Amino acid sequence: MSQPATTPDALDAPDAPDAPHAPEAPDAPHAPDPLQALQALDALGPKGPYRSRHRLTISDVTGTPMAELSLVPRLFVTRALAALRAAATPPLEERLAALKRAGELFATGTVAGMTAAAYESAVCRMSGTPLANVRIAVEAIRLSATEAYRSVQAARPVGAVGDWRDPYARSGTAVWIRRGDVFAVHAAGNHPAVHALWLEALALGYRVAVRPSRREPLTPYRLVGALREAGFGTDQVVLLPTDHDAAGEILHGADLSMVYGGQEVIDRYATDPAVLPNGPGRSKILLTADRDWRDHLDVVVDSIARHGGTACVNATAVLVEGDPAPVAEALAERLAALPSLPPQDEKAVLPVHPLEVARGFERLLLGKAAGARAWLGGDGVVDDLGDGSAALRPAVFQLDDPRDPRLGMELSFPCVWVAPWTRAAGVAALRDSLVVTAITGDEALLDALLAEPSVKNLYIGDHPTHWIAPGIPHDAYLGEFLMRTKAVIRG
């Protein structure tokens, strides 16, 4: 998973500017403060951890302060990226061994004094992500670290080799090479698993700079720390928390970048060949009349509710050939049974936010849903947990037209729009989708969906929209963006 769902408070968009602060000397050393009550999340620069004077307090969903995040100035960013550019790339075997060690350390070890169990508990409190989903994300990151090179090789053209020394180069071949040396990531905070993808850049030999989300910086802090403890040098991977003013310097100083955000991010970088934008998924399910939807209800519910409904791969629209009302009613009944619990509860499945943030989601939803038939959530979706936080409960709304733009509205909780679909509406109603799960036996329709450029992934039959596996493209292969081919012939 990558893209964050839409948020009314721009939690995963570029962070708002902070108060002005005096410039700091980059990479100033610091001594650990044993009396520091809050977890110190230092920047991790090319000379090691750096604790700035300008720090941001990170609270949990109840409003209780948990950590202090060091925000680095523009000069620190400039020098850090220069150090990455000057660094040599470690040999492939060293990179892969270090990645595997880092994945295991991240998932099971103690990093920067924090055990795996303490990390899981802290990150679910900080982000509101249910504990079970945090554990799924931890395993996804571990697996990605182990399988990163195999995954990126799936993107290599079959006619290309990985090294000019390959025997094929004697008669002429293509060699797959990096498009640059420094890769930057403006990360999202909607789910810890977004940090699984950029590990592929390290496998390919890029030096990587990560700007963490200020909503949930703990995962990248732990992951970068694990990578360094596993053998990656401080000039190979850095963590650069910044305010809004310095954020652009990270993109400016890198060869290639990946950014996360809403539709405005997609629009801003759509024509920039050096930036890979990740925006809303708008994933959908199509149920045609030749299939009994009752036989597939489990996969539809799972597609909507897994990951707390926060991911771009969660289904936010269900299109039904025939009467959509029975489908909407059944979904509402199933989703209404999900419990509202604090995120650290073993049985929690719904996302939790500070109460006022949750109310912002609710206002946005109810404003957009005016005129739609409410099967669930029409009276609101905020469930106050009594500690300053609230669970966001599921919502199911029925629309009358498959062309209704609300079918593309994505929110960071289980919210689904159900509408009728007709053959006349065709593939046009399913455009602009990261995933379409098509439950149909119509092969001509499947051919049309596969050919539609704006449908990024097509799952046929009983496969939830959130399905993914190592070596399978998410929104195409990251390697397609990071690499290119060059013709080589040698004697």
Image: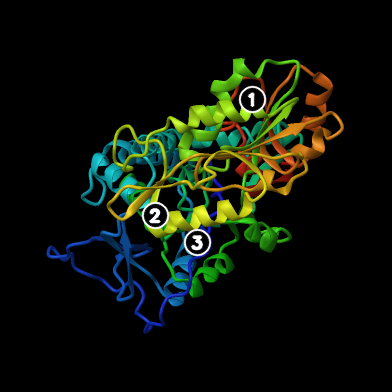
Q: Earlier in the sequence, mark 2 or mark 1?
A: 2
Q: Amino acid at mark 2?
A: Glu
Q: Position of residue 326 (x, y in %)?
A: 64, 25
In the image shown, does 184 or 66 lie closer to the viewer?
A: 66
Count of picture labels? 3
Q: Is residue 47 above or below residue 152?
A: below
Which residue is tagged 3? Answer: 9
In the image, residue 331 above or below residue 47: above
174 sits left or right of 42 in the view: right
Label 1: how many residues lie within 10 Å, few (<14), some (14-19) or many (20+)? few
**Whether residue 169 can be seen here:** yes
Work out which quarter of the rendered image holds the C terminus and state it.
top right
Mark 3 secondary-structure assignment: loop
Residue 336 coordinates in the image, percent (x, y)? 46, 33
Amino acid at circle 1: Pro
Q: Is residue 204 above or below residue 29?
A: above
Q: Nearer the viewer, mark 2 or mark 1?
A: 1
Q: Residue furthest bottom?
A: 22
Give how far apart the Cα atoms at labels 1 and 3 are: 34 Å
Q: Quadrant of residue 318?
A: top right
Where residue 216 is drawn, which disc sits there?
2
Disc sitting over residue 326 in the figure = 1
* Secondary structure under the numbered disc 1 in the rendered image: helix
The answer to whether 124 appears left or right of 442 in the picture is left
Estimate the x, y position of residue 256 in percent, counting from the top left. Answer: 60, 58
Colour approach in the figure: rainbow
Query: Residue at (74%, 39%) from the top-left corner?
Result: 400
Q: Circle 3: is it few (<14), some (14-19), or many (20+) Cα within 10 Å?
A: few
Between the residue at mark 2 and the residue at mark 1, the CA separation in whole angstroms equals 39 Å
